[in-house]
Image (cartoon, rainbow, N blue to C red):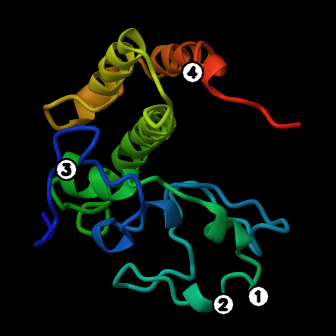
């Protein structure tokens, strides 16, 4: 585990923003890039981006847009990358143990979706919810941010599609709190 990285326990304490210095450059490795206006190259899933140096840093970070890597700028793991690296894998990396690459990618896929739902619930928490809605919000946040740390096994078993539907159903019932301007 990287020194200075804090494990968190509640949805309110989670950092839902990337901290790339605490990640193993997962987005640069596990995802597919298709040559397009977003990516200047084709890259297969599990292939290390050629712009990643041996220390896990992007060699074109400041020039990503001009060099054709707008997709890298647009991507946001919502803090899932550092949690997978530091919490789920205890600071271990695919660089030290290549067998971890697919496992870390699988964990990132699930945890990123969980973090997306937590972001939506965070926005809902700012609405003038009634006590029953606050209780339901709290229950959903507890499902998505349990008091125990995520593990590979718990992420594999997590019913992400069902949780996403529950959050969507909850949010759809909050429409009365949002005044649409037209």
Classed neighbour count for the residue bearing mark 4: other residues with Cα under 10 Å, few (<14), some (14–19), many (≥20): some
Label 2, on which residue? 63
Q: Is residue 165 left or right of residue 98?
A: right
| Residues at discs 1 and 2 in contact (Cβ within 8 Å) | yes
Q: Position of residue 116 (x, y in %)?
A: 50, 40
Report the Cα–Cα distance between label 1 and label 2: 5 Å
Q: Position of residue 62 (x, y in %)?
A: 59, 90
Can the viewer see residue 134 in this picture?
A: yes
Q: Position of residue 55 (x, y in %)?
A: 34, 84
**Which residue shows up at 36% across the image and 41% down it?**
107
Residue 171: assigned label:
4
Report the Cα–Cα distance between label 3 and label 4: 29 Å
**Which residue shows up at 48% across the image and 54% down it?**
77
Q: Position of residue 125 (x, y in %)?
A: 43, 33
Label 1, on which residue? 66
In terms of secondary structure, where does tag 1 sit? loop
């Amino acid at each position: 585990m990287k020194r200075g990285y804090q494990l968190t326990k509640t949805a309110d304490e989670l950092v839902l923003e990337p901290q790339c210095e605490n990640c193993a450059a997962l987005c640069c490795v596990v995802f597919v890039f298709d040559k397009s206006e977003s990516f200047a190259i084709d890259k297969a899933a599990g292939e290390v981006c050629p712009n990643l140096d041996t220390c896990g840093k992007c060699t074109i970070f400041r020039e990503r847009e001009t060099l054709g890597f707008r997709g890298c700028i647009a991507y946001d793991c919502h803090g899932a990358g550092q949690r997978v690296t530091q919490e789920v894998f205890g600071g271990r990396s695919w660089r030290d143990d290549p067998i971890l690459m697919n496992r870390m990618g699988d964990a990132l896929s699930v945890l990123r979706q969980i973090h997306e739902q937590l972001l939506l619930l965070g926005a809902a928490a700012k609405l003038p919810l009634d006590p029953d809605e606050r209780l339901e919000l709290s229950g959903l946040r507890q499902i998505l941010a349990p008091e125990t740390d995520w593990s590979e096994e718990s992420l594999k078993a997590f019913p992400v599609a069902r949780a996403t539907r529950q959050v969507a159903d909850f949010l759809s019932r909050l429409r009365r709190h949002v005044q649409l301007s037209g």
